[in-house]
Amino acid sequence: MRALDRSKRGGDGLEKRRRITLNDIARACGVSRATVSLVLRGSPLVHTDTRALVEAEMLRQGYVYNRAAANLRQRVSSAVALVINDLSNPFFAEFAAGVDEALGAKGFVTLLGSSNESPARQRQVLGSLMEHHPAGIILSPAESSSVADVELSIGRQMPLLVFNRALTGPESTGFEYDFLGLDNRAGARAATARLLALGHRRIAFFGGHASSSSCRERRLGYQDALRGAGIGPQASWLIETAPTRLEANARADALLALDPAPTAAVCYNDAVALGLMLGLVRLGRRPGEDFAITGFDDIPEAAVGIPPLTTVSAAPRERGRQAAELLLQRAAAPSLPGRRVIAPVHLTERESTPAVAD
């Protein structure tokens, strides 16, 4: 058998196929290269019959559009990077779905990465995504993420929208980005005020890390409501946990170990609230009957919990769509000054918040 010409062989010994180009398609169809390019861009200027002819020839020859190369030539990108701090939290799954819906409607695709609450991992993910030259980045930062760290990872020219948590450290001159947050303080204040109206006086704030900006703000709202009712917040009522269901379940013992034990808890988020409910059942308590619990976020599971969870509704899918819109606005006008947008929240009452037992 005749050996293959070495000039046609790759490093692994397999014959390399020549890449099909726009010129190949144009010659086969008897049209110009510009016409083929218009077909790829979905231009309405191309006649329907010509479009069908070109698309059929692309299929026959196995043409693959090199979008990354086209983006570099045009200095534009059809992708937006989304980096989430905790993909296991249903709130962020809903948020990501909203981002993808809004981007898809504008012809963009979503490049998804997760930091798993690690600033070091976040640097790695951002660096990798930057290699794809995205049109912009939406970042829900890992705990303790600093302005300097993010700037170092993506530079000053990349359009950036930070969601949910504020970056730590001093702002950097010339590094402009937008922030979209929730009205955490008002939401936690409303949840605590409702428990007070139901007769509860020993109310804990359960879950989250005090170093997180969102947790700090929710604690402040909780303390506002207690002080407004003439109740001095006690340090022992502030119980920290990772904002996950598993750790909230494990820390339920610490809540009931207080003497006297609280009769209610304002939880950092819905994942914490659902985990605490499981922990209380494990310890012989009955959430929704002899203990009141509120959450924050209103993930889909909150409405079907046992009992259904009273929570602060943050509309995570809508927030995702809003984040995408803000990011695309910044990408279109990079010189805009940084914007800070705080989305409203509201209390949704369900069966997890009974009145205090006599």
Image (tube, rainbow, N blue to C red):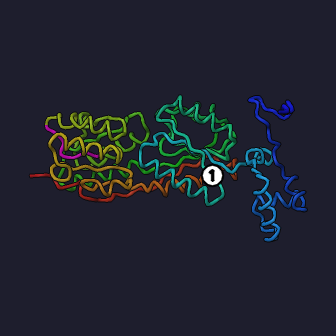
Task: Please say if 238 is above or below 192.
Answer: above
Residue type at the position of mark 1: Val
Give the residue furthest to the left: 358
Residue at 57 percent across and 34 percent down: it is: 147
Describe the element under mark 1 as helix, strand or loop.
Answer: strand
**With 78 as the anchor, is 201 left or right in this view?**
left
Q: Residues within 10 Å of mark 1 (few under 14, many from 20)?
A: some
Nearer-the-camera pick, 35 or 152: 35
Q: Which residues are magenta?
A: 260-266
Q: Residue at x 29, y 59 (%)?
A: 349
Q: Position of residue 224 (x, y in %)?
A: 31, 46
Relative side of 143 to 252, left or right: right
User: Magenta includes 219?
Assistant: no
Q: Quadrant of residue 17?
A: top right
Would residue 324 appear left or right of 58 to someone viewing this image?
A: left
**Residue furthest out toward the bottom:** 48
Residue 265 inside the magenta-drawn segment: yes
Q: Which residue is tagged 1?
A: 109
Q: Is residue 266 visible?
A: yes
Q: Position of residue 250 (x, y in %)?
A: 27, 35
Is 100 rendered above or below residue 8?
below
**Image quadrant of residue 172?**
top right
Q: Nearer the viewer, residue 257 or 6?
A: 6
Provide residue 326's location: percent of width, then percent of height: 59, 53
State the residue at coordinates (29%, 43%): 275
